[in-house]
Amino acid sequence: MLVIGLTGGIGMGKSSAAAHFKEHGVPVFDADAYVHKLYEGEAVPLIEAAFPGTTRAGRVDRGLLAREVAGRPERLKALEAIVHPLVTQAEIDFLCAQEERGAAMAVLEIPLLFETGAETRVDVTVTVSAPEEVQHRRVLEREGMTLQKFEALRARQLGDAERRARADHVLESGSTLENLHGQLDALIESLKLKDGRVMERLRGSRS
């Protein structure tokens, strides 16, 4: 099975690309969505122990937690040390399950793919990119988003130029959704010709 790592900065169109993979029958693991699940389950007692007072009614209060780690790199690293291993194990379990079902390829949708070293767990990396002005417009149109929040989120991510340079494939999402879908259709067809190698190693790391 071929493992595809899908990434892209906030507002670049990564979710639209992931949705199109799904429409082609390619299973997708959404790392961000899984973190939300952890914040309502398995990670709650671990985070409360490390960051007392940041949980409410059995779930992590994301606002309180964000304030706890804001501007404190050592606290952010402590949080990542809790969350990242749980997400990584869930990704491996997902991939093994998809392989057992006979999937030819599967996608890990990971916003911080390169930042967290997750590119070592995929065969192919794909980034979605758009011009900066398009990114700004998309993000600032989101409910509750401010320029300050946007800049804080972007500060945690690689710059678009570096992400493009490191990815095996770049999808341009600055124009129409149809254009993005056309690029994805061509990419998916080309990836059908590639052999996956990373699963051999990941199978052995499954707990």
Image (cartoon, rainbow, N blue to C red):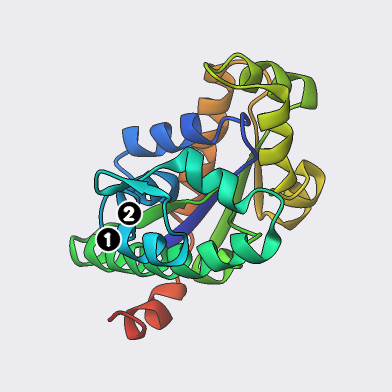
Q: Is residue 190 above or below residue 94?
A: above
Residue position marked by numbered label 1 in the rendering: 42
What number is the disc on residue 203?
A: none
Q: Farthest residue to the front: give it.
A: 53
Q: In this view of the protein, which residue sits in the foreground, 198 or 190?
A: 198
* Residue 110 image point, x, y percent: 51, 51
The quadrant of the picture occupied by the C terminus is bottom left
Secondary structure at numbered mark 2: helix
* Residue 127 image point, x, y percent: 63, 45
- Dot 2, how many residues are within 10 Å of its Cα: few (below 14), some (14-19), or many (20+)? some
Q: Is residue 91 above or below residue 28?
A: below
Q: Farthest residue to the right: give it.
A: 161
Residue position marked by numbered label 2 in the rendering: 38
- Dot 1, how many residues are within 10 Å of its Cα: few (below 14), some (14-19), or many (20+)? few
Q: Is residue 146 above or below residue 205?
A: above
Q: In this view of the protein, which residue sits in the foreground, 181 or 201?
A: 201
Res. 44 image quadrant:
bottom left
Pointer 2 with pointer 1, Cβ within 8 A: yes
Residue at figure coordinates x 60%, y 59% from the top left: 76
Say what amino acid the circle numbered 1 marks: Glu
Residue at figure coordinates x 78%, y 20% from the top left: 133
Residue at figure coordinates x 44%, y 61% from the top left: 3
Instruction: State how far apart marks 2 and 1 are (Cα).
Output: 5 Å
Answer yes or no: is residue 1 visible. Answer: no
